[in-house]
C-alpha cells in the first residue's frame, strides 16, 4: 500500500508492508544517495511483517519530486515531523519505532524525542563524511533518549562499526552491531564468508530482535 502525504515542503510517500497480527510499527527513511529500494530497507520490508512488525518506508518529498540532490537536513526533518501523525494513525496505538539508513537515520535521531518513539534503528549511520573524521555527527546519534540500535558495516567509510563503538563509548542505551566487511551500502567483498544473503539475514534478525524486545 502506498500513501502520498502532503507536507509544507511537498508531498512525501509512505509504502506500507503490513503485518497481519502486528505488534509494532517500524518507520524507516532512506539515504541521500538512494531510495527505499536499498538492500537493507527492502529486506526489512519483505521479511519483518511475517514476524509481527509492520514496516513503513518513507520517500522524502525531494525524492518523490524526482530530484537528484537531497534536501537540506532541516527540510528533511520538517517533512518527517509533518508525516508523523499519518504514521501514528497507521500504527493505531501500536509501539512506533523510527529509523532509516544513512541520512534517514540522522533524521530519525534528530526527531525521535519530539515524536516520542519506543526506539530508533540506525542502518549505516554516517558518523562523519568519508575522510573527515573531524566532522562528527555523534551528537545526533546520542540525541534520542529511547533505546537505539546501530547496524554498521565493518568497512563503512562514513564510520566503521569500530569507529562508532569508540565514539559512543560504554552505553546501556545504544547497541552497535557490526556487519563484517560491509561498506556503507551494506555490500561485502566477493570473498566475504558472510555473502549478500548473510548480510540480509543478519540485518533482519538483528532489527527484528531489537524491535520485538521493546514490545
Image (cartoon, rainbow, N blue to C red):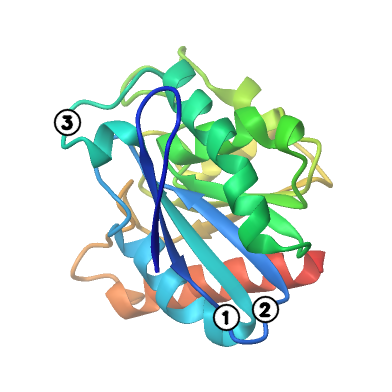
Q: Which residue, given by chain and number where applicable, does mark 1 sit on?
A: 19
Q: Are marks 2 and 3 in contact (CB under 8 Å)?
A: no
Circle 1 SS class: loop
* Residue ID at (69%, 66%): 211
Using the image as rendered, state which of residue 115 and residue 161 is in the foreground: 115
Q: Is residue 102 visible?
A: yes
Using the image as rendered, state which of residue 66 and residue 178 is in the foreground: 66
Picture coordinates of residue 166, whole percent (x, y): 63, 35
Picture coordinates of residue 107, whole percent (x, y): 52, 32
**Circle 3: is it few (<14), some (14-19), or many (20+) Cα within 10 Å?**
few
* Residue ID at (76%, 61%): 95
* Residue ID at (36%, 75%): 194
Q: Are marks 2 and 1 in contact (CB under 8 Å)?
A: yes
Q: Which residue, given by chain and number where applicable, does mark 2 sit on?
A: 22
* Residue ID at (58%, 32%): 81
Q: Label 2 to label 1, Cα distance in Å?
A: 5 Å
User: In the rendered view of the protein, which quadrant contains the N terminus?
Assistant: bottom left
Q: Label 2 to label 3, Cα distance in Å?
A: 34 Å
- In this rendering, is residue 23 above or below 182? below
Choose the circle earlier in sequence order: 2 or 3: 2
Q: Which residue, given by chain and number where applicable, does mark 3 sit on?
A: 67
Q: Is residue 163 visible?
A: no
Left or right placement of residue 7 versus residue 53 in this view: left
Residue 48 circle label: none
Left or right placement of residue 210 versus residue 76 in this view: right
User: In the rendered view of the protein, which quadrant contains the C terminus?
Assistant: bottom right
Picture coordinates of residue 188, whole percent (x, y): 28, 62
Amino acid at each position: 500500500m502506498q500513501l502520498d502525504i502532503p507536507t509544507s515542503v511537498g508531498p512525501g510517500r509512505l509504502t506500507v508492508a503490513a503485518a497481519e497480527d502486528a505488534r509494532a510499527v517500524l518507520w524507516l527513511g532512506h539515504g541521500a544517495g538512494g531510495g527505499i529500494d536499498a538492500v537493507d530497507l527492502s529486506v526489512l520490508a519483505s521479511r519483518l511483517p511475517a514476524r509481527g512488525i509492520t514496516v513503513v518506508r518513507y520517500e522524502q518529498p525531494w525524492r518523490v519530486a524526482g530530484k537528484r540532490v537531497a534536501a537540506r537536513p532541516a527540510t528533511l526533518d520538517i517533512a518527517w515531523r509533518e508525516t508523523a501523525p499519518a504514521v501514528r494513525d497507521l500504527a493505531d496505538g501500536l509501539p512506533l519505532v523510527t529509523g532509516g539508513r544513512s541520512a534517514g537515520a540522522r533524521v530519525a535521531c534528530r526527531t525521535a524525542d519530539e515524536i516520542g518513539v519506543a526506539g530508533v534503528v540506525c542502518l549505516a549511520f554516517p558518523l562523519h563524511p568519508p575522510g573527515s573524521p573531524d566532522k562528527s555527527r555523534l551528537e545526533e546519534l546520542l540525541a534520542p533518549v529511547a533505546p537505539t540500535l546501530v547496524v554498521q558495516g565493518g568497512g563503512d567509510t562514513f564510520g566503521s562499526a569500530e569507529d562508532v563503538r569508540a565514539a559512543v563509548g560504554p552505553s546501556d542505551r545504544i547497541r552497535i552491531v557490526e556487519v563484517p566487511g560491509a561498506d556503507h551500502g551494506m555490500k561485502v567483498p566477493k570473498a566475504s564468508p558472510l555473502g549478500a544473503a548473510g548480510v540480509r539475514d543478519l540485518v533482519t534478525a538483528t532489527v527484528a530482535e531489537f524491535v520485538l524486545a521493546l514490545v
